Image (spheres, coloured by chain):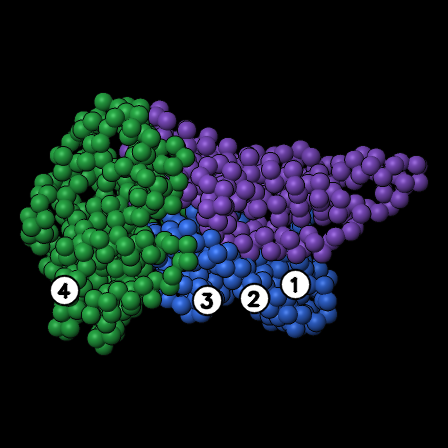
């Protein structure tokens, strides 16, 4: 694809980094937050609605406000990365809570009886059992992150999203279609990777929860 | 706590965050920020969000890298309102500019319209960290454009004739046109023309062309070098009161990056060789149905101009 | 900043002109309603069919995942180039967002109905369509409304992109504010979008409670919150 500035391959690499780093960071941040919300009803009542509200902030607005929040330069890729981390946290905190909720209380009691301390119980029993739900959350967060990175193209930061803005400016339909395919394929590739990770981490659960068919009641 | 109240609390928390984010002082929050010079010898080249500006940036980048200058491309940042602060905070070092609009950005009260006056004023008004190099004879102005049918029907060829009709005209332009001095405020002041409505479109891009063609707007802001003007038989309205100042293409660069004389030399050479007809022609080539590789278009022109 | 926000919100022109807040809000709601409606016309029958027959389950998963991965910005500019300016490309692009949660909600609602109840209905001689509409559908309603809730939230948060292709709605404040580097306008727009999302969320939670029979009223079900932003 003929683009101004950069070639497609480096842009694809940039896209992957810009999409994945926030999701991984988001997981790291969401684990303690989610655990806290799971432990304390008060925290849950504030954190869960708050993440819901964070999610409605339009991404363009968040990208533009980031340099002021962080003191970074206007075109620092960190801006997009941090903004996307916010969205990832907004999605994943709920997944962590739901995942921990799924662990049956008998299993917890058994764990305590076996001498697990709280941290050991969390790492050794609860998190492994929460893996299917966590993986489902990671899948949604990853796929949406790949799509949101493209919005950054409006401020010159969107990696493969440049195919959309430049394609639009030049009436270049094929370039836009190529961009759509490229981003969807990359997103689904990493989506599949999470399924695989889920199977490896929770081999007893063949049916890793699917983000689309799991409707939590 | 009921879910509704929890949501309310969460909303307030998010609001507080947002307000904190936007800073306490008001005004441009960037003004208070330090301006760290960009590290290293790499010259970061930025551009606005329209094809011609990207192409000029690509020409700068190609020519500079041929001369051994390390460059980084950071194109499509947006309007001047968004990339100029990027120049100031060191995000980018060089951007292809247009003298008239740059001047009005620097000084909303500026009245100069002749090329030499505009250029001299720009030099005066720029912060010391930024410099313009030689201005090119190539010019790309904003212009108010209407369809041939509209021009014939109303028998108008110039902006002062549009005046009495303005109350019935929906005008389209990029969002920033609404607030720029030569934009809606300027047209109002110079021609007593208050449009029925302003419609936010894009910077001389597909939205503006489509809106003018399908009648969503009757008059629009396009660039004089835009091939879609002749392609669609649009009519450029004359600007007898010089609302739109001279708009010579000029490299705007971070002064700290001018240590290497090759930078100044090659950018000046490009300015000398470029003219309005060439610019129009290059735009036309880029929009052609075969959608040529922009880098190739840049290289071709540089070699035909004897630069690369 | 706070004072400039207050000034922005309290300027009289914001509340009267055709470009004022009420007009933008209504436009935004209009785009949202249209997109969700068109999405529902496609997703609900499809979900009913798949849920009832059990055929095409893989399609639900694949379609929903694929659609979720589509970058809205690209879809939107593609549609505008293909269709032209106007409401149609925007509604179509937003509709694609509404389909996955509506489809998933309907499908899981129907397929989750107790098979014993369905067998019993069949046993007393109900036709397949009677089973679907008199047994399965009423039981599926809470999950269907949960899907609707997710769809509405996503579309309302993403409908800001309409402004990127010259339409109105609350996104106008964000896109114009970005181009003009007017942080007050952007923040004002973002606050309005969040407020609107919250009002809709509360209303739909109420609806969900209303269609959920007694025992499960406490915590309304929800389909997983999915991609917003736009």
Question: Residue at coordinates 59% horizontally, 52% vertically from top-left?
Answer: C67
**Cβ–Cβ under 8 Å for marks 4 and 1:** no
**Secondary structure of residue under mark 4:** helix
- Chain B on-screen colour: green
* Residue that numbered label 1 is attached to: A132
Q: CA distance from mark 3 to mark 4?
A: 35 Å
* Residue that numbered label 4 is attached to: B268
Work out whether mark 1 precedes mark 2 in sequence or the reverse, and give the earlier one: 1
* Residue that numbered label 2 is attached to: A190
Q: CA distance from mark 4 to mark 1?
A: 61 Å
Question: Residue at coordinates 40% horizontally, 68% vertically from top-left?
Answer: A7
**Secondary structure of residue under mark 2:** helix
Disc nearest the viewer among 2 and 4: 4
Q: Quadrant of residue A137?
A: bottom right
* Residue that numbered label 3 is attached to: A12
Work out whether mark 3 precedes mark 2 in sequence or the reverse, and give the earlier one: 3
> Please, which chain is the residue tagged with disc 4 on?
B
Which chain is rendered purple in the image?
Answer: C
**Secondary structure of residue under mark 3:** helix
**Cβ–Cβ under 8 Å for marks 2 and 4:** no
In the drawing, does residue B78 fall left or right of residue C22?
left
Disc 3 with disc 4 on a shared chain: no
Q: Position of residue C222 (x, y in %)?
A: 63, 46
Q: Position of residue C33 (x, y in %)?
A: 55, 34
Disc nearest the viewer among 1 and 3: 3
> Please, which chain is the residue tagged with disc 3 on?
A
């Amino acid at each position: 694809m003929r683009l101004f500035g950069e070639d497609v391959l480096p842009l694809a690499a940039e896209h992957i980094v810009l999409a994945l780093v926030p999701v991984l960071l988001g997981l790291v941040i969401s684990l303690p937050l989610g655990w806290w919300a799971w432990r304390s009803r008060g925290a849950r009542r504030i954190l869960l609605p708050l993440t819901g509200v964070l999610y409605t902030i339009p991404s363009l607005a968040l990208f533009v406000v980031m340099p002021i929040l962080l003191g970074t330069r206007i075109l620092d890729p960190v801006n997009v990365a941090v903004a996307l981390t916010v969205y990832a946290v907004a999605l994943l905190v709920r997944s962590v809570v739901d995942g921990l909720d799924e662990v049956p209380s008998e299993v917890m009691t058994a764990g305590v009886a076996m001498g697990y301390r709280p941290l050991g119980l969390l790492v050794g029993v609860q998190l492994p059992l929460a893996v299917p739900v966590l993986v489902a959350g990671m899948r949604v967060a990853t796929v949406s992150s790949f799509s949101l990175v493209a919005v950054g193209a409006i401020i010159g930061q969107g990696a493969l999203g440049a195919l959309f803005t430049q394609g639009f400016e030049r009436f270049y339909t094929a370039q836009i279609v190529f961009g759509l395919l490229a981003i969807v394929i990359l997103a689904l590739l990493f989506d599949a990777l999470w399924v695989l990770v889920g199977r490896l981490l929770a081999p007893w659960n063949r049916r890793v929860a699917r983000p689309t068919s799991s409707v939590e009641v | 706590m009921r879910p509704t109240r929890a949501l309310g609390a969460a909303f307030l928390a998010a609001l507080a965050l947002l307000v904190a984010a936007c800073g306490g002082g008001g005004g441009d929050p960037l003004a208070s920020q330090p301006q760290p010079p960009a590290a290293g010898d790499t010259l970061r080249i930025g551009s606005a969000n329209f094809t011609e500006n990207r192409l000029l940036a690509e020409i700068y980048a190609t020519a500079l890298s041929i001369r051994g200058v390390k460059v980084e491309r950071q194109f499509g940042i947006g309007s001047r309102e968004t990339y100029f602060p990027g120049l100031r905070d060191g995000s980018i070092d060089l951007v292809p500019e247009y003298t008239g609009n740059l001047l009005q950005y620097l000084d909303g009260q500026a009245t100069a319209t002749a090329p030499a006056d505009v250029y001299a004023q720009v030099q005066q008004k720029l912060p010391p960290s930024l410099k313009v190099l030689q201005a090119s004879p190539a010019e790309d102005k904003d212009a108010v454009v209407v369809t041939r049918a509209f021009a014939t029907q109303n028998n108008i060829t110039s902006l002062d004739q549009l005046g009495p009709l303005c109350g019935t005209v929906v005008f389209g332009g990029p969002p920033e046109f609404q607030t720029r001095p030569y934009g809606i405020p300027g047209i109002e002041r110079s021609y007593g023309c208050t449009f029925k409505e302003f419609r936010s479109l894009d910077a001389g891009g597909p939205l503006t062309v489509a809106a003018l063609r399908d009648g969503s707007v009757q008059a629009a802001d396009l660039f004089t070098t835009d091939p879609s003007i002749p392609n669609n038989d649009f009519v450029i309205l004359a600007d007898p009161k010089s609302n739109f100042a001279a708009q010579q293409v000029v490299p705007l660069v971070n002064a700290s990056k001018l240590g290497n004389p090759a930078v100044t030399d090659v950018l000046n050479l490009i300015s000398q060789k470029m003219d309005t007809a060439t610019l129009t022609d290059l735009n036309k080539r880029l929009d052609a149905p075969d959608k040529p590789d922009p880098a190739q278009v840049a290289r071709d022109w540089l070699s035909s101009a004897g630069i690369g | 900043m706070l004072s400039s926000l207050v000034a922005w919100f309290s300027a009289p022109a914001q509340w009267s002109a055709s470009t004022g807040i009420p007009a933008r809000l209504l436009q935004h709601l209009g785009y949202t309603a249209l997109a969700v409606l068109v999405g529902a016309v496609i997703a609900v029958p499809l979900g009913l069919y798949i849920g009832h027959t059990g055929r095409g389950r893989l399609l639900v998963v694949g379609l929903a995942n694929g659609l979720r991965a589509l970058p809205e910005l690209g879809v939107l500019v593609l549609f505008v180039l293909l269709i032209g300016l106007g409401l149609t490309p925007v509604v179509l692009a937003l509709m694609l967002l509404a389909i996955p949660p509506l489809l998933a909600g309907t499908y899981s609602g129907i397929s989750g109905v107790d098979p014993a109840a369905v067998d019993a209905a069949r046993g007393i001689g109900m036709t397949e369509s009677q089973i679907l509409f008199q047994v399965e559908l009423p039981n599926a309603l809470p999950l269907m409304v949960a899907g609707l809730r997710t769809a509405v939230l996503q579309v309302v948060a993403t409908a800001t992109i309409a402004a990127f292709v010259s339409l109105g709605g609350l996104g106008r404040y964000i896109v114009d504010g970005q181009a003009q580097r007017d942080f007050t306008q952007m923040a004002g727009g973002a606050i309005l979008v969040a407020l609107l999302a919250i009002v809709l969320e509360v209303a739909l939670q109420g609806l969900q409670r209303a269609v959920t029979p007694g025992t499960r009223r406490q915590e309304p079900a929800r389909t997983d919150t999915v991609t917003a932003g736009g």
